[in-house]
Amino acid sequence: MLRPLKAGAFALAALLASLSSAGAAWAQQDEPEKAADGAEASDKDAKGDDASGDEAGGKKDEVPSEAPASDNDPYEKPHQAYRFIGMRFRNLIVPQFILNLFADGGRTVNVFTFGPEFSTRKDGLELDFALSYADYSMGDTLFKGKSDDDNAFEIINSSMKMVYFTTDLLYEIPLDKEKGRFSLLVGGGIGLGVVFGDLRRNQATPNDPNNINRDDVSAWRRCPGPGTQFCDDANDHYGDYREASWFNGGSKPVVFPWISLPQISFRYKPVKQLQLRADLGFSISGFYFGASAAYGL
């Protein structure tokens, strides 16, 4: 009986020992797995911290981009053409002293012109193409050649008009390079005018031949016909005489040149689609000043 009991005790002890060793082994096996899981989680947390740190650093180092240019920005980019269409108004002053360089008499005349204008500009060079109507009408005025005597005085008046085709070439001097709103323009222009209308001429005689006033047309009257000192038969400028054009052997021009130099202009461009310009210049006909307004195409 003792041997079986001892054998059973030994067997039970061996079983308990094996179970305890197996439990320890399982415990040791679980601990590395837990440690590995913990390390992996730590790596993930570290990577997450690095990513968030990088993202935060990126946001911190990121430079805010400039706002896109507005569609109304008046600034003009290099190497890009800008085109406008609008209206031009000018007042051409034909001063008497210019007329008196070639003739006696006459008077200062204001010639109003207006018409459409097309402009194109690129890299500071501007071309303005204009079609302008000009009114050269003038009331009764005394007039004669520079070398003629007083007997040659005539009373003239004009209903002549012109249509000018002109081109201006202007160089831009920006006054605010960053925004492009204000500019000074310097240049000149050429063109040709087509003449129509009448130039009337009548020989004239003074109301008082003993007191000739060469500056007052009201002190003279038209000659009804030849027969006196001032009303001779040197020509047939009597009644409703109208000067013939060049085509018919007369002295009235058919075309007339336009040459202007210099021209100085000031341009204001508040937005991309609008420009306003003031002009001042000198032409072979006299001084002129004017303005234009144009819409950007």
Image: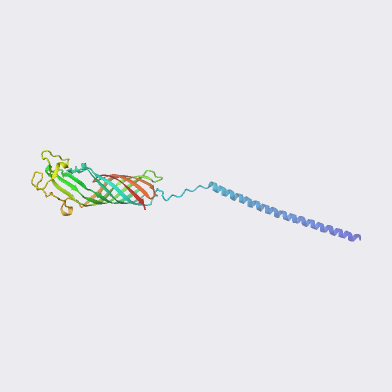
Tell me where residue 128 appears, x and y as whole percent: 31, 50
| Residue 57 relative to residue 24: left or right | left
Image height check: is 81 above or below 98?
Answer: below
Image height check: is 170 above or below 10?
Answer: above
Name the one closer to the observer, 142 or 27. Answer: 142
- What is the basis of the colouring in this image? rainbow
Res 21 seen here: yes
Q: Please state, as top left, top right, bottom left or bottom right, where the N terminus lies in the image.
A: bottom right
Res 149 seen here: no
- Picture quadrant where residue 149 is located: top left
Tell me where residue 281 appears, x and y as whole percent: 28, 44
At 70% from the left edge and 54% from the top edge, which residue is drawn? 34
At 14% from the left edge and 47% from the top edge, which residue is drawn? 202
Q: Residue furthest right?
A: 1
Q: Residue furthest left?
A: 227
| Residue 213 relative to residue 269: left or right | left
Tell me how many marks there are.
Answer: 0
Tell me where residue 176 appears, x and y as whole percent: 39, 43
Name the one closer to the observer, 28 or 64. Answer: 64
| Residue 43 relative to residue 26: left or right | left
Tell me where residue 246 appears, x and y as whole percent: 17, 53
